[in-house]
Amino acid sequence: MGDAKADVMSGVQQITVSAADSDARLDRWFKRHFPHIAHGRVEKLLRTGQLRVNGKRAKGNYRLTADDIVRVPPLPEPSEVKAERRVSDQDIAFMRSLVIYEDDDLLALNKPAGLAVQGGSKQSRHIDGLLPALGEGCRLVHRLDRDTSGILLIAKSISAAAWMGKAFQSRRAEKIYWGITNGVVKPTNGEIKGYMAKGRLDNRFGNKHEGKEVMIAVRHGTSQSKYARTLYQTAASAGNKAAWIVMQPLTGRTHQLRLHMQLLGAPLAGDPRYMTDRPLPGGLENKLHLHAASIAIPRPNGGLAHFSAPLPLHMQKAFEVLGFDSKQPLEPFDVGA
């Protein structure tokens, strides 16, 4: 963590970032060293300016460098937080029902669509808040959108969180997503890349979410823009009305896959923010059809840990309606340069 100096009277800590933590995101650094503090509280500390870097306000995605000074405000003790975050027997049963793999280092969950991973506005129930149901010391190492289902890995210790977090940050963790698009993407296979930034949803399609934050494609050099790259292939199509798309994101941007499918002319079926004027194909539920199907992550002692999650019910139904065979062999992606 680095050297820490504390004001005994105020409880404020001034922590010098170590070389080992250089280039870590501020929010992830904080969670690694203060795992008992919920993500929602971390966001509040950042938003209110109580958590600072070198005396200045900072965002969660700020990349730390060695010798940065992080101001950490007074925090509750782990025992106090544990009392606050007691979970019920029902919560324990629910979280255990999501576990599809467990060993000494990690758990793999099949997160259901509609359940947020972390807290936020109007999000009182989320995976992060339910982690105590899986055991002391469990922590997040990556995220999924609330309406995306599928594989979510949970670290069971600080050391496991460190190596898993580095694997995700360095893009050595291979993530594969399945989606069903409203229409057929063109071209049907290939790569899409470019810059994206935050924007606002317009009312072209009479969307009730008008004004909500979305990601939009922008030119290189646009303020706050980030580069995004996705490999994709069409595994099957139902005429021109829908397709089963397999995607490998090579970057990890917010709503990356959802925006990229829209830019290719066929947004994901049931997506409330990245839309088309085409009606939803008959027989499909009005839910986001995006599933984190698998993750392969290198272990520190060698070898590759691979996890896959079965489709949620609404996507199983869509596969049946559209005549797609989820067991058909798929072509591997050639990541290239």
Image: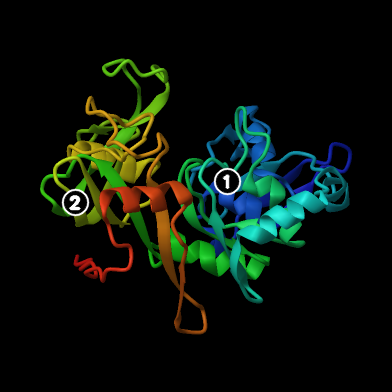
- Residue at 75% over, 55% down: 92
Viewer can see residue 66: no
Q: Looking at the image, is mark 1 or mark 2 earlier in the sequence? A: 1
Q: Disc 1 versus disc 2: distance between alpha carbons?
A: 31 Å
Amino acid type at mark 2: Ser
Residue to which mark 2 is pinned: 237
Q: Secondary structure at mark 1?
A: loop
Viewer can see residue 304: yes
Residue 73 location, quadrant: top right
Q: Quadrant of the N terminus?
A: bottom right
- Residue at 70% over, 49% down: 130
Q: Judge the density around disc 1: few (<14), some (14-19), many (≥20) Cα neighbours within 10 Å.
A: many
Q: Quadrant of the C terminus?
A: bottom left
- The image shows residue 297, relative to residue 261, as above or below, that is below
Name the one closer to the observer, 148 or 191.
148
Amino acid type at mark 1: Val
- Residue at 14% over, 42% down: 240
Please state which of the two labelled residues, at mark 1 or mark 2, is closer to the viewer.
2
Q: Indicate the position of residue 75 as horizontal and vertical percent values.
A: 79, 42
Residue to which mark 1 is pinned: 117
Marks 1,2: beta carbons within 8 A: no
Name the one closer to the observer, 35 or 91.
91
